[in-house]
Image: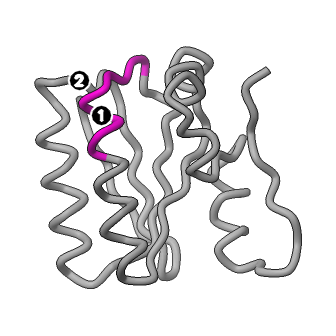
Amino acid sequence: MEIKTKKAGEVIVLEITGRIDAFTSEKLEAELHSIMNAGKLKFVINFEKTNYISSSGLRVFLGSHKKLSENKGQIKFSNMPDPVLKVFALAGFDKIFEIYSTEKEALEDFNETESEPKKQSYA
């Protein structure tokens, strides 16, 4: 797994390439916590190049969601390939998290508070 980080205004975008599993989830968790501990509380996770996520990866995002919520932060997801989206849907995470078709839509939603977000859905 490779994690690329970029800044878009106050939002940190993480682009994840490869698999998020029991072996790589610790690296992801450490990266997220390091950024949160630096005071950054708005995240978009771009899954465009992610081909697999296990329950270990889901746990990382659930824990990060809890920590961010306690500090008035938020995590949003974008560009989910069908296999990853199916795992999120089966776990009920599509009801907990905001999932967008594109990174641009997720970033725009951080700036829009009155309009309905354009969420990606599992059909």
Q: Secondary structure at mark 1?
A: helix
Give, as a single range, the part of the protein colored magenta.
Answer: 51-60
Q: Residue at x 36, y 38 (%)?
A: 16
Residue 29 percent coordinates (x, y): 19, 50
Choose top left, top right, bottom left or bottom right for residue 85: top right
Q: Secondary structure at mark 2?
A: loop
Task: Categorize mark 1 by other alpha carbons within 10 Å: few (<14), some (14-19), many (20+).
Answer: many
Choose top left, top right, bottom left or bottom right for residue 116: bottom right
Which mark is on residue 31?
none
Measured Cα–Cα span from mark 1 to mark 2: 6 Å
Q: Residue at x 18, y 77 (%)?
A: 37
Compare residues 67 and 24 and report the one nearer the observer. 67
Q: Label 2 is placed on what type of residue?
A: Asp
Residue 99 percent coordinates (x, y): 64, 46
Is the residue 27 above or below the residue 76 in the image?
above
Q: Residue at x 75, y 34 (%)?
A: 121
Which mark is on residue 21?
2
